[in-house]
Image (cartoon, grey):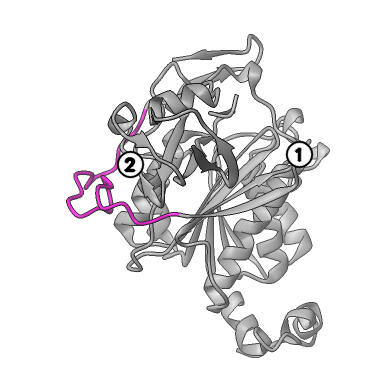
Amino acid sequence: MDFTEQQIERYSRHIILSEVGVEGQEKLLNSKVLIIGTGGLGAPAAMFLAAAGVGTIGLVDRDVVDLSNLQRQIIHQTKDVGKLKAVSGRETINEMNPDIKVIEYHTFVDSSNIMDIIKDQDYDFIIDGTDNFAAKFLINDACVLAKKPFSHAGIIRFHGQLTTYIPDNNTPCYRCIFKQPPPEGVVPTCREAGVLGVMGGVIGTLQATEAIKYILGLGDSLAGYLLTYDALDMEFRKIKIKHNKKCGVCGDEPHITSLIDYAQPVCDLSTGTIKG
Amino acid sequence: MKVQINGQEKELAGPLTVEELLKVENVKMPEMVSVEINGEILDREQFSEVIVKEDDEIEFLYFMGGGACGLY
């Protein structure tokens, strides 16, 4: 592909890196990343991937922007309150970098649509930016079954974690670590929940880093490790995780061969209780 | 006995099971924790059977997301 002069200037700090160069930048511009959830994690991930020149970015979200999102979901602005998050995300991305093609999916993922979304653009890498266990297990299982690399992450209060799954590499998946969602009734009410706004910035940006490294074939990924971050102690730990032979979806005798819709409790912020 | 829990050395009055260790370590929601000992993830069903030994390297891996994790 031929770069325009503007593109050469825009991506000059990438191109000057011997590990990236013109070839690497071309790879990025030809790559496709799907971001599921454009919230605390997905917002910064989407912005850095767009800035980096990842040519096609899929945004999956059925939510609309709420004022309480703006403390951490930096892709959305005050003027966007009430707007669909995927629309708001696309507008911010295109203002920042008109090179990027943004595909909007105004839906939440479930067993009936996730495979179609992943295969819609044959995405190269998937970022789990969701905030609930049902979606996290669904994304894991879908990526394992579809043999797609993905980045899992979670944030809460002053804590964050992430790992990377690379198919066909004896990489542990999310389910290797966490066999199944926590039993209903154990997840505390949302009144107890809260998250420091920057947690999504730190962890979502690391997810974007893993996506870019995967596309460029650079360095070592977090495959086989769970990275945990404690902002209060300012401590990162990289915990070695082995592939779990007994894993239900990627173990020696997998019993999960189709996708599961786990019940997802709905948080009622006005009362701080969990419904359903 | 000495063990390592999440990278920190701890002195424990042993022997004890993983289930007992979760109590001793004041893990409020054990259902929200996966336990790895010396690199192997345990089945939850094993928590009451597996005995923690001297020099074991133990990781409590917490579920994170949905406004919840097992840390509190």
- Main secondary-structure element of the magenta-colored stretch: loop
Where are the magenta residues, as a range?
A241-262
Q: Provide the secondary structure element on which disc 1 rests.
A: loop
**What residue is shown with label 1?**
A232
- Which residue is at 41% across, 52% downward? B39
Structural crowding at the residue carrying mark 2, measured as other residues with C-alpha within 10 Å and reported as few (<14), some (14–19) or many (≥20)? few
> Quarter-wise, where is residue A160 in the image?
top right
The percent position of residue A88, horizontal first and vertical second, equals: 70, 46
Under mark 1, the amino acid is: Leu
| Snapshot quadrant of residue A76 | top right
For the point 65% across and 67% down, the residue is: A100
Q: Is residue B56 above or below residue B12?
A: below
The residue that disc 2 covers is: A112
Mark 2 → mark 1, Cα distance in angstroms: 40 Å
Q: Chain of mark 2?
A: A
Please indicate, yes or no, whether residue A31 appears anywhere in the rendered image. Answer: no
Q: Is residue A53 above or below residue B28?
A: below
Residue A143 in percent (x, y) is at 38, 55
Mark 2 or mark 1: whose residue is earlier in sequence: 2
